[in-house]
Image: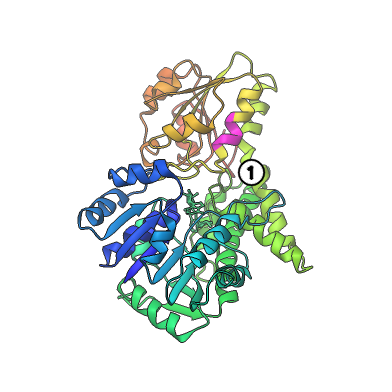
Amino acid sequence: MHIAVIGTGYVGLVVGAGLAETGNDVVCADIDDGKIERLNDGEIPIYEPGLEPMVRRNLGAGRLRFTTDVGAAVRQSSVIFIAVGTPPGEDGSADLQHVLAVADTIGANMDGEKVVITKSTVPVGTAAKVRAAIEARTDHEVHDCSNPEFLKEGAAVEDFMKPDRVVVGIDSDYAREVLEELFAPFVRTGNPVIFMDIASAEITKYAANAMLATRISFMNMVSRLCEAVGADVDMVRYGIGTDERIGPAFLFAGVGYGGSCFPKDVQALIRTMHEHDLDAGILEAVEAVNAAQKRLLLDRVVERYGEDLGGRTFAVWGLSFKPETDDMREATSRVVIQGLVERGATVRAHDPQAMDEAARVLPREGVELVENNYEALEGADALLIMTEWQPYRRPNFERIVATLKEPVIFDGRNLFRPGKMREMGFEYVSVGRPLRLT
Ligand SMILES: NC(=O)c1ccc[n+]([C@@H]2O[C@H](COP(=O)([O-])OP(=O)(O)OC[C@H]3O[C@@H](n4cnc5c(N)ncnc54)[C@H](O)[C@@H]3O)[C@@H](O)[C@H]2O)c1
């Protein structure tokens, strides 16, 4: 099939490369000239495991192309994916300007019957707006579909190539046939392609992210009770996660959720509920718990050292919002580092992949980015762990003790066993576990 993917970000690039991998002829279009130039040189603008070889392979085979000419990409294709960003607007609702701008360009370049699939996460009712924008520009038949994407950054290639399920909202038999054929290579082991009406597909994406965010906030709430009474949230997690009605995923207490999806999607769903005069109490609570949790390590530092952190230095390990990505959108590290710097502290920070992004988004004053995680410890009063990257899980503790001014660790990801840390002489603060072990 001849396919255009419009918007070549985290999602568009994975989708484009994945569809080319199964033999399709794919053109990825984006209005960001710099990004397209780099991609045409075989350079991948983001860190995502397995993506680079897949892009290079398909570029080399001539099945994958990159362009800034969105109109030409539309004209060359019979199937078009819209994968542009839907960032939060000022009121929290999803900003649809990019999606609708693409719909307008599609309409202006329709030269035959085409299937147009919205992959961006969009509020219920958006597919109808996309169709209206296209039909305002053309008499050619458009088959409008919703195909929300469930990939996780850090495992995006694996998730796209072997999805648990594919959700597709359609309102024509033709679209169903085309998409059944397109997705067949990805579900050979029997995982379902679930066809439904378009509104249900649009809601499914928000409901999935809101449910996952709810689990995280729920456990973070429970972690506060565990701290208050000296219980261990990891044992509670194990205790409930083994109940098959609950399951073990997304139950880790920590420093809250970040990233480009959960925060904005929870907000957008609240907004949609309100637009329909419906109560969004659960989601509002999920957001409030998360906002408090993102400040947790900052609050712990202030409890320990006081409001004035002038003259103090803190090492931070992990800047991306989760491991195996360089994405720092809504990352908790940003909240904590901003709070430390505002109180006069110096921060020495390390991340295995997000250093370029960190240089772009972190405050310049008061933050030093260092190439090696042990170098971050030099002259530091304490270490804060923000992201559970693998290399941080089994560090050289003797070296940490020898390098920090005092052996103090604030662990936002519960990487270590509190008893062991105490034995090694650390003052060790983690999440939802006994704060002071005797
Ligand atoms: N990142 C994820 O993990 C993830 C997962 C599932 C769904 N989503 C959803 O997918 C969508 C895209 O997310 P992302 O993280 O890939 O965003 P992104 O910001 O990484 O990429 C969006 C791309 O769209 C381009 N763009 C904007 N306007 C354009 C236009 N008019 N024409 C062509 N290109 C244009 C931008 O230049 C950018 O490269 C969002 O709706 C998001 O909610 C993201």
Examine the rendering and report whether any part of residue 219 can be seen. no
Residue nearer the viewer, 227 or 75 = 75
Chain part drawn in magenta: 333-337
| Quarter containing the N terminus | bottom left
Q: Quadrant of residue 192?
A: bottom left
298 lies above or below 146: above
Q: Mark 1 points at which residue?
A: 293
Instruction: Answer whether residue 58 is magenta in the image.
Output: no
Position of 432 with respect to 166 (left or right) is right
Which residue corresponds to the image point at 50% horizontal and 56% vertical from the top-left?
84
Residue nearer the viewer, 329 or 252 = 329
Which residue corresponds to the image point at 70% horizontal and 23% vertical from the top-left?
307
| Quarter containing the C terminus | top right
Question: In the current view of this chain or complex, which residue is farthest to the right?
Answer: 277
Residue nearer the viewer, 216 or 66 = 66
288 lies above or below 188: above
Instruction: Answer whether residue 336 is magenta in the image.
Output: yes
Q: Which colour scheme is used?
A: rainbow
Examine the rendering and report whether any part of residue 15 can be seen. yes
Q: Residues within 10 Å of mark 1 (few under 14, many from 20)?
A: many
Number of labelled discs? 1
Q: Position of residue 250 (x, y in %)?
A: 51, 57
What is the chief secondary structure element of the magenta stretch? helix
Amino acid type assigned to the residue bearing label 1 in the image: Gln
Question: In the current view of this chain or complex, which residue is farthest to the left?
Answer: 61
Which residue corresponds to the image point at 66% horizontal and 61% vertical from the top-left?
269
Which residue corresponds to the image point at 32% horizontal and 51% vertical from the top-left?
51
Residue nearer the viewer, 6 or 10 = 6
Mark 1 element type: helix
